[in-house]
Amino acid sequence: MRFRTALTAVAATTALAFAVPLGAQTPPPLKVGFMLPATGTFAALGDMIEKGFKLYVDEQGGKLGGRSLQYFKVDDESEPSKATDNVNKLIKRDQVDVIVGTVHSGVALAMARAAKESNTMLIVPNAGADGITGPLCAPNIFRSSFSNWQPGYATGVVAAKKGYKRAMTITWNYAAGTETVKGFTEAFEKGGGKVMKELNLPFPNVEFQALLTEIAAQKPDVVFAFFAGGGAVKFVKDYDAAGLRRTIPLMGSGFLTDGTLEAQGASAQGLVTALHYGDNLETPRNNAFRNKFAVTYKANPDVYAMQGYDAAQLLGAGLNAVKGDFKKRNEMVAAMKKAQIDSPRGKFTLSAQHNPTQDFYVREVKGNYNVVTGVAVKSLADPGRGCKM
Ligand code: BEZ
């Protein structure tokens, strides 16, 4: 009896094998691991990235390159000390094909090291750590966002053009802060200005009072700040409450006012920043993206949502080229390298180190929007210092 059952099973399997041509078998879903912050000062940024990514996939009918996706998730807490363990949950435990993450530069550097060692494909949808597309660059590591140097440099160009001569900078003391300030200083001093003092506090500390007192005493022409998420909300409000907004112009890379304006309210009005996105870019591509996002999520997108959307576009460019066959890694990487991404920010390509070469806009806060008032630097490429690939 048992023998007959086994025979029937063999016959059924054989019949199935003949019925479905080998090439037509549906491949298993591609495993995509999100490593993003779900808690802490950058939690909202992580949420926006995931929403943007999934929006693009939904627009493609839930597939990229004809391949369906299965999602895995790890909350990285924006905590560098846990980053290696966290990324290994995706690489070793879940055995994902692609990792998408993260927001925090310190966490992303550990992810890049682990991705490089294990040859896992990594797409960075925010963290700007220069090293990712510098000394840590690798064929399997891509970025859909920016390097920290880029928005810092672009803001330095704008500040120098405004004629400011003496600047103070203020930021968190970690890769994103120090590298953004470095980019700002490079452009600002090239344009004739001088950074007279750099102020720092540990991430994600928001006790700004002593530093604001020092700014008030030194009276620079301009203050340049890098903060983002919850920290940016608190800083902009404290700067205003200290009476500084009316006396010492505050500028920043656009993260200072992106995704934060409802919470910052009147304290952010009129602030000028530079970034690779603006809410009112009047292009059919951006309008379609913003409308679809608003309808789907009942919220306005921000720069983080746009970068998540473009991370999915970049992965899609690779998977389209190989019709979803992830094993054809070399072909896939070649297609991603030469992709021209039709982004809501405007079209962009990747540098040799896999970082977007893109326009940076001047933006001014009006109501709840970062309104584009001009172009800070066209087609700004990260120098990719230290990358050997
Ligand atoms: C970073 O850590 O690289 C980062 C975080 C938030 C906004 C921009 C950059």
Image (spheres, rainbow, N blue to C red):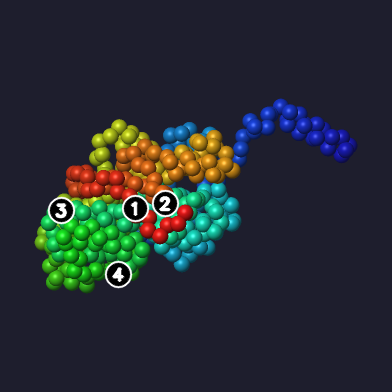
Quickly name the residue at label 2: 353
Mark closest to the chain's N terminus, 2 or 4: 4
Quadrant for residue 129, please give it: bottom left
Instruction: Look at 11% across and 59% down and name the residue there.
Output: 246
Query: Which element carries disc 1, helix, strand or loop?
Result: loop
373 on left or right of 94: left
Secondary structure at numbered mark 2: loop
Viewer-nearest of labels 2 and 3? 2
Classify residue 261 as left or right of residue 218: right
Q: Which disc number belongs to residue 201?
A: 4
Q: Are marks 2 and 3 in contact (CB under 8 Å)?
A: no
**Do tag 3 and tag 4 residues touch (Cβ < 8 Å)?**
no
Residue at the top extreme, as displayed: 19
Residue at which label 1 appears: 382
Q: Quadrant of the N terminus?
A: top right
Q: Earlier in the sequence, mark 3 or mark 4?
A: 3
State the CA–CA distance, disc 3 to disc 1: 21 Å
> How far apart, in angstroms, are the residues tagged by discs 2 and 4?
31 Å
Q: Quadrant of residue 58?
A: top left
Measuring from the top left, give residue 307's x and y in whole percent. Answer: 37, 46
Q: Is residue 132 visible?
A: no
User: Hey, what amino acid is under mark 1?
Assistant: Asp
At x 47%, y 40%, the residue is: 335
Query: Mark 1 or mark 2: which comes first in sequence?
Result: 2
